[in-house]
Image: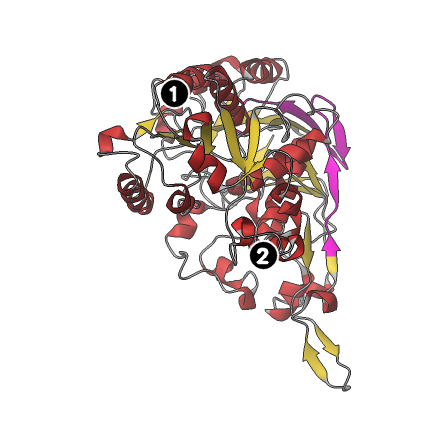
């Protein structure tokens, strides 16, 4: 018997965690955060307690209560059914891509359970881990928690410093697009699709009771439309019993393309007399490419932040991805170094040594501080008409130092708010932009963006042309649309299962 159990991604956007059991083989398809459900109980001022391991997540159904799945240090400390003494019987986790709603809860998993993903997904998770902070950024490695050791006085102490806690490395196996691989009784076929991150794969899963497909997140309006088309063609030729199909935006009827966004941004920059401030998803490298081309055609430098520079540098090391995206030291690229900690970047370097200045910055970003293409607020402030400056919602403080001149503009190339909390955040952002004259009213809020998810007509194409016997809507709150497009739609419940026969 082959069974799929749905521990997330049902009647919600994201949070995909699908357990596939075939004979004695057990694998998860994604292991993501249920952002909407988590937001019902937790917020920035009230996060789940680390002291309780997975317990706070179990309480609200955010993680499945399964033995042998989770880190031993957490299981031991929260006294989870002596789970830390048990061996795991899970054989792997397939990660479609590195968005948090598909990958964030890897942090909780046993390190010996292999993570299967593309090289691009691994590089993005590495960047998140090395440039992030806190336990939620621990994708590939983590420090063991709740460790007691004998100190120099011969008494027991809690290990709070890095040196007294063992670093645990996860088992990560890189998968190649279109190249099948075996996990015990299950054969997996990764098929690239177009989404708002590099290296995204859907999967064909071949089991002892037939085959099913998993779309991951996909669209037809990005730079890699042909990959999604090939995925649908592969579905049609694979005699699928079921297709797990995403439906994030099935209620939408139109969209721009990524190339149209590039054109929009170019026109906005060209019509700006002084500084063009732009924001976009930092790990969406296709969007970076659009902004890069727009800035180049408009005759400006694109000033990115150190996190994006670090991500670009990681991709430069890849044989498969080098050359697809701009290098971090491309002639058009400048790396903007924000003031941090003591704010010494602009101090007299005869009085404040390089070592003291670099102490303001994390290890991973120090190489960019004095790089050949490094700039700070003084450079941008003096030459505002020469720059398109990336400024995230978390770096608005840089505007205090730069002081945009009259004739500057703000271009937003990221998603619009979809809940009340995001709307409140956007109002605060607009207050900052109004203060610095970048917008004068809400109508000046220039947005040009395309989603990583297909519109209704695109998902209808996937449903109808994949030629699957049954469709299972996932990653959607509008599952009723699927009933219009297919005669055999199986609506599953959260924590429910289906048998493949």
Q: Residue 449, position in %: x, y?
A: 40, 25
Residue 170 is inside the magenta segment: yes
Given residues 263 and 100, the one toward you in this image is 263
Q: Tell me: residue 32, above or below residue 167.
A: above
Above or below, 172 relative to 350 = above
Dot 2 alpha-carbon crowd within 10 angstroms: few under 14, some 14 to 19, many 20 or more: few
Left or right, 90 with reference to 406:
right
Q: Based on the picture, tell me whether residue 118 belongs to the magenta stretch.
A: no
CA distance for labels 1 and 2: 37 Å
- Where residue 344 appears, x then y in whole percent? 54, 54
Q: Is residue 9 above or below residue 323?
A: below
N-terminal-most mark, 1 or 2:
2
Could you tell whether 257 is left or right of 94 in the image? left
The residue that disc 1 covers is: 456
Task: In this rendered view, identify the residue nearer to me: 386 or 431.
Answer: 386
Judge whether residue 267 can be spotted in this image. Answer: yes
Which residues are drawn in magenta? 168-196
Give 396 or 100, whichever is nearer the viewer. Answer: 396
Residue with the most extreme front position: 350
Residue drawn at x 71%, y 40% is 23
In this image, 13 relative to 362: left or right? Answer: left
**Mark 2: secondary structure:** helix
Q: Which residue is mark 2?
A: 135
Q: Does residue 475 show up?
A: no
Vertical side of 454 occupied by 11: above or below: below
Q: Quadrant of the N terminus?
A: top right
């Amino acid at each position: 018997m082959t069974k799929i159990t749905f521990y997330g991604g049902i009647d919600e956007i994201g949070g995909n965690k699908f357990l596939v059991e075939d004979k004695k083989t057990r694998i998860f398809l994604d292991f993501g955060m249920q952002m909407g459900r988590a937001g019902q109980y937790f917020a920035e001022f009230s996060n789940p307690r680390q002291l309780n391991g997975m317990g706070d997540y179990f309480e609200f159904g955010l993680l499945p209560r399964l033995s042998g799945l989770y880190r031993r240090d957490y299981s031991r400390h929260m006294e989870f059914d002596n789970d830390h003494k048990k061996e795991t019987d899970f054989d792997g986790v397939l990660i479609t891509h590195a968005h948090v709603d598909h990958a964030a809860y890897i942090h909780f998993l046993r390190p010996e359970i292999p993570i299967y993903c593309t090289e691009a997904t691994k590089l993005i998770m590495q960047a998140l881990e090395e440039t992030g902070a806190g336990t939620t950024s621990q994708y590939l490695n983590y420090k063991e928690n709740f460790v007691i050791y004998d100190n120099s006085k011969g008494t027991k102490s809690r290990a709070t410093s890095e040196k007294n806690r063992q670093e645990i490395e996860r088992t990560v196996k890189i998968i190649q697009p279109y190249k099948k691989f075996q996990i015990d009784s299950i054969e997996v076929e990764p098929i690239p699709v177009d989404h708002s991150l590099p290296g995204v794969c859907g999967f064909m899963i071949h089991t002892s009771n037939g085959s099913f497909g998993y779309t991951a997140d996909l669209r037809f309006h990005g730079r890699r439309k042909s990959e999604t088309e090939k995925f649908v063609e592969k579905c049609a030729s694979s005699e699928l019993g079921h297709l797990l199909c995403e439906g994030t935006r099935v209620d939408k009827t139109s969209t721009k393309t990524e190339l149209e966004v590039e054109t929009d941004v170019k026109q906005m920059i060209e019509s700006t007399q002084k500084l063009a401030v732009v924001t976009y998803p930092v790990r969406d490298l296709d969007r970076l490419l659009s902004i890069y081309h727009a800035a180049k055609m408009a005759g400006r430098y694109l000033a990115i932040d150190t996190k994006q520079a670090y991500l670009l540098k990681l991709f430069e090391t890849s044989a498969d991805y080098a050359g697809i995206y701009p290098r971090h030291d491309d002639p058009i690229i400048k790396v903007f170094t924000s003031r941090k900690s003591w704010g010494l970047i602009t101090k007299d370097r005869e009085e404040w040594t390089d070592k003291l200045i670099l102490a303001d910055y994390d290890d991973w970003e120090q190489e960019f501080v004095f790089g050949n293409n490094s700039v700070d607020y003084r450079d941008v402030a003096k030459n505002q008409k020469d720059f398109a400056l990336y400024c995230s919602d978390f770096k608005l403080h840089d505007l205090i130092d730069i002081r945009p001149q009259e004739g500057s503009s703000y271009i937003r190339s990221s998603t619009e708010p979809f809940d009340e909390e995001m709307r409140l955040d956007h109002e605060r952002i607009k207050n900052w932009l109004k203060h610095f004259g970048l917008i004068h009213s809400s109508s000046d809020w220039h947005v040009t963006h395309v989603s990583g998810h297909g519109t209704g007509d695109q998902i209808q194409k996937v449903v109808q042309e994949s030629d699957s016997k049954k469709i299972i809507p996932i990653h959607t709150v509008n599952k009723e649309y699927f009933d219009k497009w297919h005669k055999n739609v199986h609506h599953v419940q959260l924590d429910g299962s289906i048998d493949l026969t």
